[in-house]
């Protein structure tokens, strides 16, 4: 029997990919949860019955202030926003509205409502093209696209707000999030997703003809881009640990990388999908995409030394297998 929790956690974007996994992790840990999502990209069915649900836009300060008061919210996990890098280049104002401006409104509602703790879904895109790999949190923040810049601006707003008001925060900079809930309760469900493992398992079950490999001349062992893939359920667990840390350390705020500290190339990922599925995905070699770094790998020593969190699913085959199981489940729904 877990101890009763002192307040409710508001999860914005809790009907989306990462947010829905955070909701599951919070509920599994005994926290009361209220989800706010506008369902533009999220799915109502992804929110468990055990969580309260409000369909709303986080940019509406009065609405969010009312939700905070009604549900006795003491902490916010903020996942809502737009996340497609190429789209951010084509439509930057959408990203500054959905990510930066909406976050400013949410932070205002949090301050007005007396929320003490704020956990923010940030990104390794705040680093841009890194000077060194693995990337430390102290590395220069020099985003090369509006998506990364919109997230960095929110980090800055949180820092300034925490200096002026009784609220502390944790900004978690994600690397490449993949996989699905091992119990099959949620997964990456967005149509037209741009994540490599999602695309690869779609190809493995026949939803796509092939997988494009963008660039084979990077300064990496096999010439393809290297990324640090973290299982979405490990990432969700990191948010729960971050919440517990903030509660126990009033006045302390944190910015930490979320990754395993080990990179895999595009070809290594596709080879792993082939092994898990016992079939060969067709690969189409394409030109590089502008702005893709050779390698993005987290230095994760800070999160490991600060939180009690330890990865439980640091295995590329498991990440792929869980993503594949979810993809097959999605196919059955359609």
Image (spheres, rainbow, N blue to C red):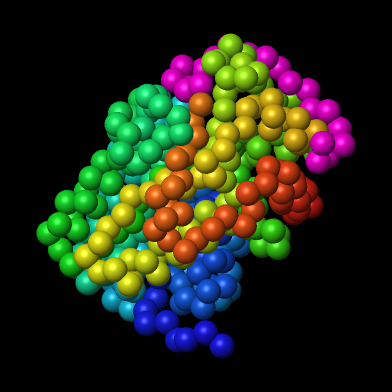
Q: Is residue 38 visible?
A: no
Residue found at the far right of this picture: 278
Is 172 positioned to the left or the right of 180 in the image? left
Tell me if 166 is positioned left or right of 288 in this view: left
Residue drawn at the location 52% of the way across and 54% of the way down: 235
Residue at horizontal 33%, vertical 71%? 247
Q: Is residue 164 above or below residue 126?
A: below
Residue at 47%, 23% (x, y): give it: 293
Q: Residue at x 37, y 24 (%)?
A: 131
Residue 193 is a magenta residue: no
The part of the image, by quadrant, that contains residue 278 is: top right
The answer, for residue 125, to whether it is visible in the render is yes
Locate residue 69, reporting x and y percent. Answer: 29, 76
Q: Is residue 276 magenta?
A: yes
Count the numbered circles shown: 0
The answer to whether 235 appears left or right of 164 in the picture is: right
Give the image location of residue 102, x and y in percent.
Answer: 30, 49
Of residues 145 and 62, which is closer to you in this image?
145
Q: Is residue 248 above or below residue 285?
A: below
| Image coords of residue 56 (percent x, y) | 39, 60
Q: Is residue 200 above or below residue 328?
A: above
**Where are the magenta residues, as a range?**
275-294
Nearer to the camera, 257 or 4: 257
Tell me residue 191's x, y (percent).
Answer: 61, 41
Q: Residue furthest left?
A: 164
Main SS class of the magenta portion in the image: loop
Q: Quadrant of the N terminus?
A: bottom right
Depth check, front residue: 115 or 2: 2
Judging depth in this view, the residue of 131 and 71 nearest the camera is 131
């Amino acid at each position: 029997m877990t101890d009763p929790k002192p307040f409710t956690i508001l999860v914005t974007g809790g009907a989306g990919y990462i947010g829905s996994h955070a909701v599951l992790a919070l509920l599994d840990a005994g926290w009361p949860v209220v989800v706010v999502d506008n369902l533009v990209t999220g799915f109502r069915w992804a929110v468990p019955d055990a969580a309260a649900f409000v369909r709303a836009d986080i940019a509406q300060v009065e609405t969010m202030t009312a939700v905070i008061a009604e549900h006795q919210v003491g902490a916010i996990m903020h996942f809502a926003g737009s996340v497609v890098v190429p789209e951010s280049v084509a439509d930057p104002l959408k990203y500054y509205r959905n990510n930066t401006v909406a976050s400013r409104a949410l932070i205002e509602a949090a301050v007005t409502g007396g929320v003490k703790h704020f956990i923010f879904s940030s990104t390794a895109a705040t680093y841009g093209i890194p000077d060194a790999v693995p990337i430390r949190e102290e590395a220069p923040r020099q985003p090369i696209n509006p998506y990364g810049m919109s997230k960095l601006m929110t980090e800055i707003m949180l820092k300034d707000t925490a200096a002026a008001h009784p609220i502390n925060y944790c900004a978690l900079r994600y690397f490449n999030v993949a996989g699905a809930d091992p119990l099959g309760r949620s997964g990456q469900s967005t149509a037209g997703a741009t994540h490599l493992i999602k695309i690869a398992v779609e190809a493995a079950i026949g939803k796509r003809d092939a997988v494009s490999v963008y660039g084979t001349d990077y300064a990496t062992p096999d010439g393809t881009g290297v990324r640090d893939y973290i299982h979405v359920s490990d990432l969700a667990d990191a948010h729960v640990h971050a919440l517990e840390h903030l509660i126990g350390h009033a006045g302390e705020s944190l910015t930490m990388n979320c990754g395993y500290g080990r990179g895999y190339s595009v070809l290594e990922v596709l080879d792993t999908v082939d092994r898990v599925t016992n079939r060969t995905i067709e690969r189409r070699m394409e030109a590089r995409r502008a702005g893709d770094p050779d390698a993005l790998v987290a230095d994760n020593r800070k999160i490991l030394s600060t939180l009690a969190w330890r990865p439980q699913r640091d295995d590329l085959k498991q990440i792929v297998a869980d993503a594949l199981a979810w993809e097959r489940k999605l196919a059955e729904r359609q």
